[in-house]
Amino acid sequence: MSKVNDIFGKDLTVINAGLTSMAKSVSDQGVKVIDLDWCPPKEGVPHLRQTKDGLDIDAANQEVIGRIKRGQAVLAGMGIAREVIPGMHSHMLLHAGPPITWDRMCGPQRGAVMGALIYEGLAGDEPEAARLAASGGIEFSPCHHHHAVGPMAGVVSASMPVFILENKAFGNRAYCTQNEGLGKVLRYGGMGAEVTARLKWMETDLYPALDRALQSLPNGIDIKSLIAQALHMGDECHNRNRAATSLFLRAIGPALARTNRDNEQLARVIEFIDRNDHFFLNLSMPTGKALLEPAEGVPGSSILTVMARNGTDFGIRLGCMPDRWFTAPAGKVQGLYFPQFSEKDANPDIGDSTITETAGYGGMAMAAAPAIVQFVGGSPQRATNTTLEMYEITAGEHEQFTIPALNFRGTPLGIDVRRVMETGILPQINTGIAHKDPGIGMVGAGILRAPEQCFKDAFDALKDL
């Protein structure tokens, strides 16, 4: 009997859509086999082609895809949250995910809220901060309601410096705070003197240095281009940002030097960015937001423009219904934990960082970042399989964001709620893990699927349009 290689050649790659055991005889002959996590289409799910009003859903989706692709996200500058974020005021705290009240907030989000109130000087200690948060004297609002995004708890307070990302093709702007690093940090619900001190240094030293540098760059920094380059260097720009952070430091470095006022301060700024491989996350996230917002409000579109979690709820929004949230309970992350922590310590899924998957990178581009499995768990093969599977639920492919390992194929773009329901394939997300109790911070990182119920509800609403 002829061997597979003798018939098809030695460079053959086989995709197995069945049981792993089905392809064993092929892999035993030295042929590369990719096991695809596949299941038959769901029964009873209609394929929607038009809305009740007769709108062509596929045509609407192509308009959405086209708008996202045409976007040009540039780091245009920085500012203080209360001065630049629309609707922000001194007694407002923005948070990640869909709307939520203090009584329903999870531990890490409560920790971030209390830490932010102490940072702002509105409370002297944690008990006072908790009382103020519960009093009704603080307005809580989702970042997404203010053209902003926030990683993990996503808390933004009035005095915090924020990046301003401008979509030059459409004129809209998006906002995000600076990244603190990993471990015991505010976005993971960390509290304490060291957390507050770091945030104050970021306000008084890091922000002015970056702001001066950006003011000297009339065209800003093309962050979309940096993401495209980073995907060719082993990042996926959600949980792996090592190359992207280095590219950013390279892009802003000369301007930092030219606008420098103090050599030691400059050295600390460079060290802080260099030692924080996640620094670029807070640039990749608002880039995704800036690229997606022009796609909102397209009648008949079944594509997601928001996926976000607050640690209690997981929420999505569709391009055709940009003001309506569809929610389900946030899921548990399966992953790798720091020493002395385990799954029993983990809070459910949290953060706005799923804007990266929504915009066509992050978990969608895991095939570009095989080394990410050292951080979130799994195997390089699983990283590749994840990207291949996500093509099944998206309406298009990026032209600017490509994956070398897939022969420079564009990343999956435009999560289509119809395809999610038809295939039963839920978006896959890689993410950090926060401790379930306030004040502790990060305990690990991992992978999970988005919950089905919010997609089902969105699909049902789409059928009624």
Image (spheres, rainbow, N blue to C red):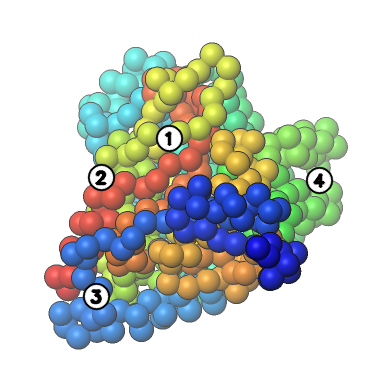
Q: Are marks 3 and 1 in contact (CB under 8 Å)?
A: no
Q: At label 1, which amino acid type do we have?
A: Val
Q: Is residue 343 left or right of residue 382?
A: left
Find disc 1 in the rendering and name its residue: 333
Query: What is the quadrant of the C terminus in the image?
Result: bottom left
Q: Give the Cα distance between marks 4 and 1.
A: 43 Å
Q: Give the Cα distance between marks 3 and 2.
A: 23 Å
The residue mark sitting in front, 3 or 4, is 3
Identify the secondary structure beneath mark 1. loop
Find disc 4 in the rendering and name its residue: 260
Residue 190 lies, in percent from the top left, at 49, 24
Identify the secondary structure beneath mark 4. loop
Out of 146 and 181, give the one closest to the viewer. 181
Q: Is residue 96 left or right of residue 282?
A: left
Q: Give the Cα distance between marks 3 and 1.
A: 32 Å
Find disc 2 in the rendering and name its residue: 328
The residue mark sitting in front, 2 or 1, is 1
Find disc 3 in the rendering and name its residue: 48
The 10 Å Cα crowd at callout 1, few under 14, some 14 to 19, many 20 or more, is: many
Where, by quadrant of the figure, is residue 53 drawn? bottom left
The 10 Å Cα crowd at callout 4, few under 14, some 14 to 19, many 20 or more, is: some
